[in-house]
């Protein structure tokens, strides 16, 4: 899972990136405004279930689920890096389309030493500016697709009339939504329609989490609502970055002193994970306790494939029990006695918190 951190210059994107990744990349305008640049890091997803499973099974290794974050610089509303009549610049668009979703950082703090490029701090204005750029970029892409479909029809070079009609109807529907300022994540699509647009990587179809980067006083008002289909959180970016860069023991003391119950970053990381409709299942043993990521609604063979393709291809059955049952009854022997240890087949839908052991037949070597 890869999430792109985007936003206007001086919004605090790199501050949030450092906080999420415990990094120390230069902030405060050290990166040249308008210059395309990407910084990436991998972050473990905090999950106390992994900690408790590790305490029970005492494995040699403990591995958490992961999120990849990319700090993407180079976006400016109405400037060379943003959408105009031709869309986003090539390198920026290429990077944006590789993301599974976005964290849109919106400035909601005052700092006279880091002036806003527009002359004032206005979260609603900045939020609308970036949303507008993303919508415009998608609208241009959809219009170009419709033009090609129309040209194919006029030239009579349609290979599949049924598919051509289906694409024409779909992209007309998408154009109507975008023209009404509706991001495409709000448009209900069938499985067949999802398959058609999968290769187009439309930006407003991707999940979005808006992070309002507030100051210590939280004095700048933020919009009560964000774009349809998006979620929003408020975060004291500078404080969270400073805490993330402290040794864990020092950070804990600081949090206790100021009555901070939980790092806001943990919440953001978990929301990032949930944003894409993902869930965790676990494998356990003396060698390793590990959280694996799969989509919600995944079948047992699909989840097995996250571990290794051989497990998916040679899948026979899955031994399944839940983390919650393990915590309630205390051990696998007790689970079996209570009928909570099951064998499931290919049609089983994996649930968040399932503990799996895959039975499989190794595929024949080619």
Image (cartoon, grey):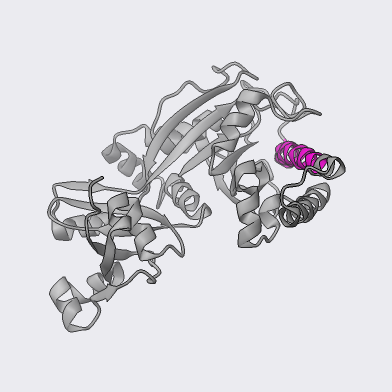
Residue 182, position as x, y percentages in the image: 76, 52
Q: Quadrant of the N terminus?
A: top left
Residue at 18%, 79% (x, y): give it.
336
Residue 162, position as x, y percentages in the image: 74, 57
**Which residue, as the protein is rendered here, is positioned at the far right?**
154
Which of these two is toward me, 172 or 205? 172
**Which residue, as the protein is rendered here, is positioned at the far bottom?**
338
Question: Is 358 positioned to the left or the right of 333 in the image?
Answer: right
Quadrant of the image occupied by residue 303: bottom left
Predominant SS along the magenta part: helix
Instruction: Determine whether 49 is above or below 265 in the image.
Output: below
125 in the magenta segment: yes
Residue at 65%, 49% (x, y): give it.
197
Instruction: Determine whether 129 is above or below 289 in the image.
Output: above
Residue at 76%, 54% (x, y): give it.
161
Which of these two is toward me, 145 or 179? 145
Residue 307 visible in the picture: yes
Residue 156, position as x, y percentages in the image: 83, 44
Identify the magenta region. Answer: 122-148
């Amino acid at each position: 899972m890869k999430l792109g951190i985007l936003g206007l210059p001086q919004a605090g994107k790199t501050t949030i990136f450092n906080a999420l990744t415990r990094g120390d990349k230069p902030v405060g305008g050290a990166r040249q405004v308008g210059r395309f640049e990407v910084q990436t890091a991998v972050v473990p997803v905090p999950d106390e279930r992994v900690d408790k499973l590790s305490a029970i099974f005492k494995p040699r290794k403990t591995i958490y689920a992961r999120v990849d974050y990319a700090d993407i610089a180079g976006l400016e509303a109405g400037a060379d890096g943003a959408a105009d009549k031709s869309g986003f610049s090539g390198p920026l668009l290429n990077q944006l389309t590789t993301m599974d979703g976005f964290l849109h950082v919106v400035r909601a703090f005052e700092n006279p030493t880091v002036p806003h490029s527009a002359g004032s701090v206005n979260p609603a204005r900045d939020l609308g500016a970036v949303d507008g750029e993303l919508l415009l970029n998608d609208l241009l892409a959809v219009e170009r697709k419709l033009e090609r479909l129309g040209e194919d029809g006029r030239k009579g070079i349609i290979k599949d009339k049924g598919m051509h009609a289906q694409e024409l109807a779909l992209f007309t529907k998408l154009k109507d939504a975008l023209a009404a300022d509706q991001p495409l994540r709000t448009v209900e699509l069938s499985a067949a329609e999802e398959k058609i647009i999968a290769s187009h990587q439309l930006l407003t179809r991707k999940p979005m989490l808006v992070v309002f980067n507030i100051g210590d006083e939280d004095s700048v008002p933020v919009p009560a609502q964000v774009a349809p289909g998006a979620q929003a959180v408020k975060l004291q970016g500078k404080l969270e970055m400073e805490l993330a860069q402290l040794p864990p023991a020092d950070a804990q003391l600081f949090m206790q002193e100021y009555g901070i119950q939980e790092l806001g970053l943990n919440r953001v990381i978990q929301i990032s994970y949930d944003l894409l409709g993902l869930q965790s299942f676990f494998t356990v043993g003396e060698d390793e306790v590990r959280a694996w990521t799969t989509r919600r609604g995944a079948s047992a063979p699909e989840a097995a494939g996250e571990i290794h393709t051989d497990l998916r291809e040679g899948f026979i059955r899955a031994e399944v029990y839940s983390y919650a049952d393990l915590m309630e009854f205390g051990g696998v022997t007790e689970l079996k006695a209570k009928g909570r240890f099951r064998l499931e087949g290919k049609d089983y839908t994996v649930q968040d918190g399932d503990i799996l052991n895959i039975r499989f037949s190794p595929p024949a070597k080619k």
